[in-house]
Image (cartoon, rainbow, N blue to C red):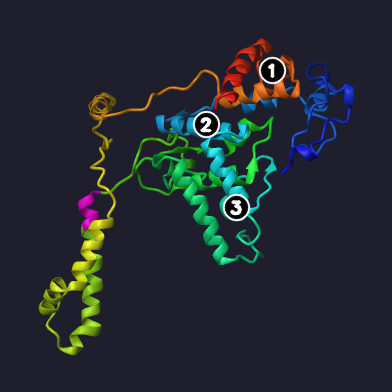
Amino acid sequence: METLANSRYCARGDQCAEFPVLGAPTRLGQYNPEEICESCRTKLGELPPRVSEAAAVHAKPQFAESGLARALRTQREELLLQILKKRGPFWGAVRDMRERWGLQPATQLPPNPSTCAIWSQCGPEGVRNVPGSVVDERLFEDWNHDLNTLLCEWVPERFRRLDILPKPLDFVAACVLFDPPVPGLVEFNSALLPRATAIMGPTPGTLADKFRNEEESLQWMVLPPIRQIRDPRVDRDIEARHWIDVLMTVWELYIEPQELDFKQMLKTVYESENFRQRVDEWNRNKPADTGPRYFVEVDEFTTEDDVRVAFGMLSKAQEERPRQGRSARNRLVCAEAAELHDGHGWSYDRLAVRYGWDDPNRASKFIKDGRELLNTW
């Protein structure tokens, strides 16, 4: 992973094709093995012209985002802004955990969470659960406990779903282990946001077969509001049958040979103090009942109008709904642009190259919003 400390720059120096815009040779990407930048290689005829890397990084996604995905993105932007500013309650909790574990965070992008479990493989010595390492089980449990405490305190329950990948715990671990680089704030957040998924139709065939089927059009969305559930009555019957089979096997192997009466045994269990204590303990500690959740079933008879009407019915039944929509300007881009302009002397032109803007004057509005964000608290 390339950090700011070991960044490489185009070897052509002031002859770099980006020099008139940036006022300096451009920084080489971490995956660029060449000694000169791609702009220079294009100018020298080694590469055909292509869309700039900055424009590609900050281009709008080609898939839909659900309301939950937009809310999660906004919440993580808020937490990362606190890390950047070194102010705010989340930053205080992160700072305390860093001090407790004696961490000196590197300023860099996090590892790819699809190939590296950040929370378990990038922690302090003694908790890194990687091949060839010696893990201290007590330290590992303490580390896991501290990260989960941070997660539960600062990430709402709806954003801690088990099907969110990369895992929310990796996001919290990255905030503890790394400081987001500037530039690189947007990429830091993007690396840890959930990816778009596709819903496969309930037709026969393997997943690979369906992807190879060019006639099937896949619809992609980030955190789609879709659940795949079986009939609850069928699930209950399966669960009941399982435990009946277990109980009857125990009866046949261990109880029946003792010539005990099965019905009398169950009656004794239900009347025992042991059973009563367990029931009381469950009633005291059972999770709060949040009530049933509604799902719209879409099958071969469901029309688009059916879904719209059903959504309207369910929407009106909600007591509170978060405000939807996103700001026209990404808050992390605003904060980073203000930091680069005010703290590092970046010009409007250089910012335009960084973010793929056609008009460098757009920077003024981003910088204004970024200053307001950085001056809160």
> Which numbered mark, 2 or 3, is in the foreground of this view?
3
Q: Which residue is label 3 attached to?
A: 100
Any part of residue 144 in sight: yes
Q: Could you say which quadrant of the image residue 10 lies in? A: top right
Q: Amino acid at mark 3?
A: Arg
Residues packed near mark 2 inside 10 Å, few (<14), some (14 to 19) or many (20 plus): some
Q: Amino acid at mark 1?
A: Ala
> Which numbered mark, 1 or 3, is in the foreground of this view?
3
Horizontal side, residue 197 vs residue 256: left or right = right
Q: Which residue is label 2 attached to?
A: 78
Asked if residue 196 is positioned above or below residue 346 in the image, the reply reads below
Majority SS type along the magenta span: helix
Any part of residue 110 in sight: no
User: Answer yes or no: do the residues labelled 1 and 3 have beta carbons within 8 Å?
Assistant: no
Asked if residue 260 is positioned above or below residue 57 in the image, the reply reads below
Asked if residue 53 is positioned above or below residue 94 in the image, the reply reads above
Which one is nearer the viewer's eye here, 210 or 73? 73
Residue 234, magenta (yes or no): yes
Residue 46, magenta (yes or no): no
User: Which span is picked out in magenta?
Assistant: 231-236
- Quadrant for the C terminus, please: top right
Q: Which mark is residue 352?
A: 1
